[in-house]
Amino acid sequence: MSKRTIREKPAKRDAARPRRSAKLTAKHRLKIATEAGSDAGVWSTGDGGEKPFWETKRLQDMTPAEWDAVCDGCGQCCLNKIEEEDTGRIYLTRLSCRLLDLDSCRCTDYANRFAKMPDCMSIDMKAVRKLKWLPESCGYRRLHEGRGLAWWHPLVSGDPDTVHQAGVSVRGWARSEKGVPQSEIERYIIGEAG
């Protein structure tokens, strides 16, 4: 089993193309970032309209609906983790919570997730600051660290499938925990968190 890592890729620039000082529209910057395969944040530059809420509000000031919209739908936080009791090290597995739809990478019962899965963890501001296993690509982590949202984030692209097209989601490689005996979970470790 291979270890899957997610790394920031610097934007590629064609040396033959001169730099322009004119401001680019958000749509044009998105097109350039998409073509280059960049994971850099895509920021609006005041091209006539209001800046989007994720550029003007701090995470802790967002409404519940805005907070939920920052989730990119990658499903990575829904992967099971194993903690070593002696060291406190946390390992990620490719086993997902049984409530995760592995095609859409969204919870099948989001409203009742805590009742159905008592070990489900709420991703709130405290978790964003504390959890070392949140992926580098996580929208909450990116905004908290001042990196902006990536081109493939549904709020930027306008398309919930770009997170899958960019290869950031667990679609195609995660497996549900359903039917996996507790004694075999370690077989599904993909690497250490953080």
Image: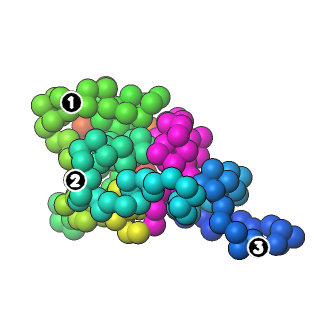
Q: Which mark is residue 111?
A: 1
Whether residue 136 appears in this view of the structure is no
Name the element at disc 1: helix
Q: Residues within 10 Å of mark 2 (few under 14, many from 20)?
A: some
- Which callout, 3 or 1, points to the residue nearer the camera? 3
Percent coordinates x, y for residue 83 in the rendering: 23, 56
Amino acid at pointer 3: Arg
- Identify the magenta region: 147-172
Amino acid at pointer 2: Asp
Q: Are marks 2 and 1 in contact (CB under 8 Å)?
A: no
Magenta-colored segment: predominant secondary structure: loop
Give me the C-alpha separation between circle 2 and circle 1: 15 Å
Percent coordinates x, y for residue 188 in the rendering: 39, 44
Give me the C-alpha separation between circle 3 and circle 2: 40 Å
Q: Which mark is residue 128?
A: none
Counting residues from the N terminus, which is met first, the one under dot 3 or under dot 1? Answer: 3
In the rendered view, would you say 51 is above or below 155? below
Label 2: which residue? 124
Counting residues from the N terminus, which is met first, the one under dot 2 or under dot 1? Answer: 1
